[in-house]
Image: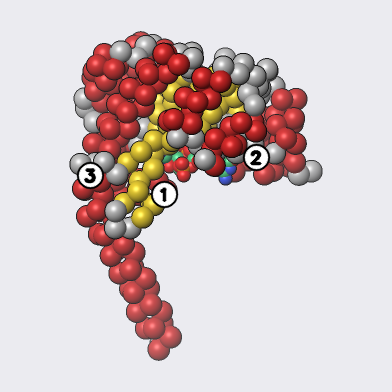
Amino acid sequence: KRSGGNQYRFHTMEMNAAFQRHVELEAYLRKALERGEFTLLYQPQVELDGERLIGVEALIRWNCAELGLISPAQFIPVAEQTGLIRSIGHWVLEEACREAKRWEACGGGHVEISVNVSAGQFMQPDFVSRVRSILSSTGLAPQRLCLEITESMVVHNLQATLTMLQELAELGIRIAMDDFGTGYSSLSVIKQLPISTIKIDRSFMGDLTKEDADRSIVPAIISMSTTLGKKVVAEGVETSEQLQLLKRMGCDTAQGYYFSRPLTASALIRYFQYGVEKLDTRTLREDASS
Ligand code: C2E
Ligand code: MG
Ligand code: MG
Ligand code: MG
């Protein structure tokens, strides 16, 4: 009983610490937009047939004046819980579209921009009209925009999600299913949705080179996606061995540290301006660390 009591108290202390951290993050997060503390990095997506850069994923970074660099894995959940995700997500979408429009003048006009969308942002009644107005104010062609959604968004609200995805697809925007394989969406759900791309979660990449049953998950996702006429992107590719296996399995596109870490906007533009047709991974690696 005594140890039970201690455990309870320990648990409470842990919860208090987590709660305080949440309160602290929330307070600073509320000021982050007006203080201009967010930036976007862009991680290349490479077409495996020819190893050309065909797209980039926008990834948010928060450099908080008081707390330093906070990862999105930490603050996106807080933004979700507090509703701040709506204004942060709006900023991300606008910034990413504005930036992608600029690439037309420096050799990156063909590059697709992928933007992560959270559940709380997607579920706003005016989400589709916000997207439409950002496209018209930035002048970005809808065909160059891809929105990344997750399986849990679909599972929790299939009918509403389906309607919105259809409206977005009608505008010409592409939709990708992010982190695929970690959630619970069934084949029949995937088949119903107007999504063009499936991103295989990076947790499966480690299994790829093992002689083990998990190895068959990746080829299974690739063949399912291909059968359904969807493009496949492998996330988190770190080694040439993984890359060779993915190519052999018929994967279209890959993203990961093997090709490049997420780059600053200026490093990406410098890459476009070199005009290198075939991706030079060494150039990108140097850019990433500069
Ligand atoms: P995600 O959308 O699945 O993004 C991919 C994450 O994997 C990124 O982490 C990226 O830096 C990391 N990554 C890429 N290649 C590799 C690799 O080869 N190895 C390893 N170990 N990691 C790799 P990041 O930038 O920390 O973002 C984490 C998550 O936060 C994202 O996962 C996404 O769910 C969320 N996120 C990031 N930016 C935004 C945003 O602007 N809006 C929203 N709503 N969520 C965002
Ligand atoms: Mg993503
Ligand atoms: Mg992902
Ligand atoms: Mg993820």
Q: Which residue is mark 2?
A: 238
Instruction: Of the two numbered discs 3 and 2 on the same chain, state the one appearing first in sequence.
Output: 3
Residue at image position (49%, 14%) is 107
Badge 2 residue CB within 8 Å of ligand 1: yes
Instruction: Of the two numbered discs 1 and 3 on the same chain, state the one appearing first in sequence.
Output: 3
**Whole-Å distance between the Cαs marked 1 and 3?**
18 Å
Q: Which residue is mark 3?
A: 35
Q: Which mark is residue 279?
A: none
Q: Which mark is residue 71?
A: 1
Location of residue 11 by image quarter? bottom left
Badge 1 residue CB within 8 Å of ligand 1: yes
In the drawing, does residue 171 fall left or right of residue 276?
Answer: left
Indicate the amino acid at tag 3: Arg
Residue 74 shows in the view: no
Indicate the amino acid at tag 1: Ser
Quarter of the figure with the N terminus? bottom left
Residue 102 shows in the view: yes
> 51 and 266: which one is in front?
266
For marks 1 and 3, give the one nearer the viewer: 3
Residue at image position (62%, 16%) is 277
Location of residue 127 by image quarter? top left
